[in-house]
Image: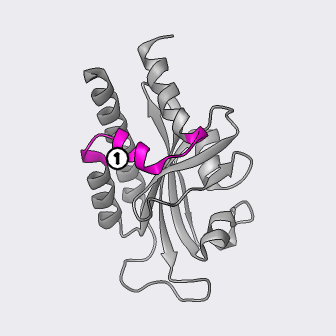
């Protein structure tokens, strides 16, 4: 097994037995700050790093900018995060509740309403290992869109998230190569 395969296996191991604090300690020091800055710049409410499990049937949140305790897995057969992973393309949806192929699981579990979402594939050493996503949320299930942010994402936000996923991967790869 190559060193790159070892790194990939280490990353996907976090999806098997999620330990959000462990995953955060594993990330290079600059990554959490970078993600929070990007979330702010985009007018998003939070970002999540989803990692594929070792059975290759679910994506698991291993890091979230707002709630370290947030743990959730998404089957690869539904939702926009899974679509970005399976098709290996950025997925940008506005007014998510209008799409029949959206998945309400996280919103239902956390009593929130996702209005807008961008999900982009995440690679390490050129190998797909997960998705980076950002969302804009309503305050609760019945509220109007929040007024403290510009509503919706533009195409520049998609480009920014793709670039952010690349920078995070480069930081992780560099950090592991130093060990």
Element type at mark 1:
helix
Look at the image and tell me whether residue 66 can be seen.
yes
Q: How many numbered marks have been drawn onto this rendered protein structure?
A: 1
Magenta stretch, main secondary structure, is: helix
On whether residue 24 falls in the magenta region, the answer is: yes
Q: Which residue is mark 1?
A: 164
Residue 83 belongs to the span the image colors magenta: no
149 vs 112, left or right, is left
Q: Position of residue 170 (x, y in %)?
A: 32, 33
Q: Nearer the viewer, residue 12 or 173?
A: 12
Badge 1: residue crowd in 10 Å (few <14, some 14–19, many ≥20): some
Residue sitting nearer the eye, 116 or 112:
112
- Quarter of the image with the C terminus in it: top left
Place residue 156 in its image quadrant.
Answer: bottom left
Question: Of residues 75 and 14, which is closer to you in this image?
Answer: 14
| Residue plotted at (67% across, 43% down) | 58
Residue 148 higher or lower than 49, as above or below: below
Magenta range is 15-31
Q: Is residue 42 left or right of residue 102?
A: left
Image vertical order of residue 140 relative to residue 54, above or below: below
* Residue 64: x %, y % from top left: 44, 57
Residue at figure coordinates x 34%, y 47% from the top left: 164
Task: Kindly indicate the quadrant of the structure image that contains residue 88.
Answer: top right
| Residue drawn at 32 percent across, 26 percent down | 176
Could you say where residue 127 lies in the image, as x and y percent from the top left?
50, 27
């Amino acid at each position: 097994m190559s060193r790159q395969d070892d790194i990939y296996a280490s990353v996907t191991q976090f999806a098997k037995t999620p330990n959000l604090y462990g995953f955060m300690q594993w990330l290079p020091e600059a990554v959490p700050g970078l993600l929070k800055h990007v979330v702010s710049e985009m007018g998003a409410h939070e970002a999540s790093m989803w990692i594929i499990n070792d059975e290759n049937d679910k994506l698991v949140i291993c890091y979230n900018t707002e709630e370290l305790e947030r743990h959730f897995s998404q089957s690869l057969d539904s939702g926009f995060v899974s679509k970005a992973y399976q098709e290996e393309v950025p997925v940008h949806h506005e007014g998510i509740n209008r799409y029949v192929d959206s998945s309400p699981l996280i919103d239902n579990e956390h009593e929130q309403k996702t209005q807008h979402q961008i999900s982009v594939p995440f690679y390490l050493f050129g190998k797909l290992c997960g998705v980076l996503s950002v969302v804009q949320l309503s305050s609760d299930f019945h509220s109007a869109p929040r007024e403290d942010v510009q509503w919706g994402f533009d195409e520049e936000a998609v480009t920014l998230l793709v670039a952010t996923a690349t920078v995070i991967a480069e930081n992780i790869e560099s950090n592991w190569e130093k060990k």
